[in-house]
Amino acid sequence: MKLYENVVIGNFLYGLGYSIGISSSERNQLSVINLLQQTPADKELGDMLLEFPGVVRLIEFKNSASSLKKEKKRCDQLTVAIGENDAFKKISREIHWYVETKPFEELCLNNIKPYLDAFSKIPSAHTIESLITEITNSVISPKSTISPIELEAYLALVSKCQGSGSVGTGGLIVSVSKKGIRYVQFADIMELRLQHKDYVMKVEKEFNSIMDKKLEKELKKERALDKEKTLNKGMTL
């Protein structure tokens, strides 16, 4: 039997959404769910980039029956790029995960480890269920001490050692509350906006559907200002 990666990913997202939903039913929950599999950003980062206020997870899904040569090479490249940088090692083992499944008729063996340890002989750190529980607990009670700047620097390192260093993929912020589900778009998933408290407060205050013209106009202005700042930095350099 072959358990395709997209089947695992789909059920993982369903389970994660349900788990977080029942655990945070009394408050608004902001999230960014980036399924990057088979997109240009897949080669730069991985299959999935999850973001919640105070929490980031980059996850690569694999079926053990598939060829793992390319993934081993990517893991080796990242290991070399990190080198003896203990700060990046800590960040990597907290946010960057490898999920490999090997199905049988009655059970599914999991190889779920920090990405740096993906092909080591250390035992699996999780099952799919316990990984979902760990992420849910982190979302409900964030305890990470990694700064937004450090998170963005790590993702940039991953992107550079696995690809061109330019992701260029937009995303959607999802707000789930008793009022329903609402979305707003943003320009670059590498910005990790939900790690910045001021931005989260602004979104929670002003959040509305992307069909809301007023909010859309404000976001366009903000993107224009960000672009202008980037151009000014480039000219300064």
Image (cartoon, helix red, strand yellow):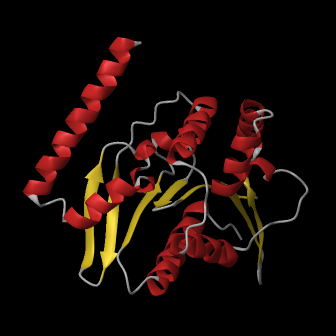
Left/right of residue 17 with respect to residue 226 in the rendered view: right
Quarter holding the N terminus is bottom right
Residue at (47, 56) in percent of width and height:
35
Examine the rendering and report whether any part of residue 61 can be seen.
Answer: no
Q: How many marks?
A: 0
- Side of 5 where 24 appears, left or right: left
Q: Quadrant of residue 101?
A: bottom right
Which residue occupies the foreground of this view, 144 or 33? 144
Residue at 27% of width from left, 53% of height from top?
Answer: 185
The residue at the point 63 percent across, 55 percent down is 95
Q: Residue furthest right?
A: 121
Image spot of residue 207 (x, y percent): 22, 64
Q: Quadrant of the C terminus?
A: top left
> On screen, 222 above or below 141?
above
Relative to the observer, which residue lies in front, 168 or 186?
186
Q: Quadrant of residue 31?
A: bottom left
Image spot of residue 228 (x, y percent) = 25, 26
| Residue 141 visible in image | yes
Does residue 18 lie above or below 151 as drawn?
below
**Residue 134 in the image: x percent, y percent?**
64, 73
Residue 34 lies in quadrant:
bottom left
Q: Residue, x 18% and y 64% (percent of image)? A: 209
* Horizontal arrangement in the rendering, residue 83 relative to residue 10 (left or right): right
Q: Is residue 164 above or below residue 50?
A: above
